[in-house]
Amino acid sequence: MRNPVPLATTEALNQSWSIDFMHGALICGRRFRTFNVVDDFNREALGIEIDLNIPAQRVVRVLDRIVANRGYPLKMRMDNGPELISLALAQ
């Protein structure tokens, strides 16, 4: 079992972003996904993308749009889920 490492705190805006996927279901039973980008300093939602399917190319477009408005963060936090280890994101 791995020993968890405490997350480092950020000192200012745009130092660290967390990105992750979530999922849910509509009342009719259809499942949907959300892609979320959050600034770790003030917990501001920089982007929320909602759809039935969110391919890697769309994730790249969302991140590019945020970077165009805010610049690049010093680091990004994410898990190693299948959505975030694709070739499109690696490029």
Image (tube, helix red, strand yellow):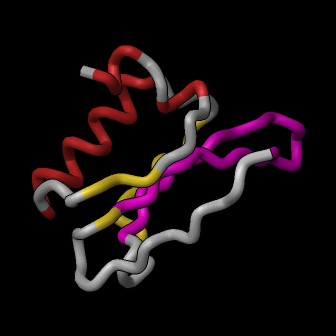
Q: Residue at x 20, y 47 (%)?
A: 65
Image vertical order of residue 8 relative to residue 91, above or below: below
Image vertical order of residue 34 relative to residue 4, above or below: above
Image vertical order of residue 19 relative to residue 4, above or below: above
Q: Which residues are magenta?
A: 17-39
- Classify residue 64 as left or right of residue 19: left
Q: Position of residue 7 (x, y in %)?
A: 51, 69
Q: Please name whichever residue, 30 or 57, is drawn nearer the observer in this view of the structure.
A: 57
One can see residue 44 in this view: no
Where the N terminus falls, by quadrant? top right
Q: Residue at x 27, y 35 (%)?
A: 61
- Classify residue 30 as left or right of residue 76: right
Q: Quadrant of residue 38?
A: bottom left
**Label tally:** 0
Q: Please name whichever residue, 62 or 1, is drawn nearer the observer in this view of the structure.
A: 1
Q: Residue at x 56, y 43 (%)?
A: 79
- Classify residue 50 as left or right of residue 28: left
One can see residue 11 in this view: yes
Q: Please name whichever residue, 12 or 53, is drawn nearer the observer in this view of the structure.
A: 12
**What secondary structure do most residues of the magenta stretch adopt?**
strand
- Classify residue 91 as left or right of residue 2: left
Magenta highlight on residue 19: yes
Q: Position of residue 49 (x, y in %)?
A: 47, 48
Q: Residue at x 66, y 60 (%)?
A: 4
Magenta highlight on residue 18: yes
Q: Position of residue 13 (x, y in %)?
A: 24, 78
Q: Quadrant of residue 18?
A: bottom left
Q: Quadrant of residue 91?
A: top left
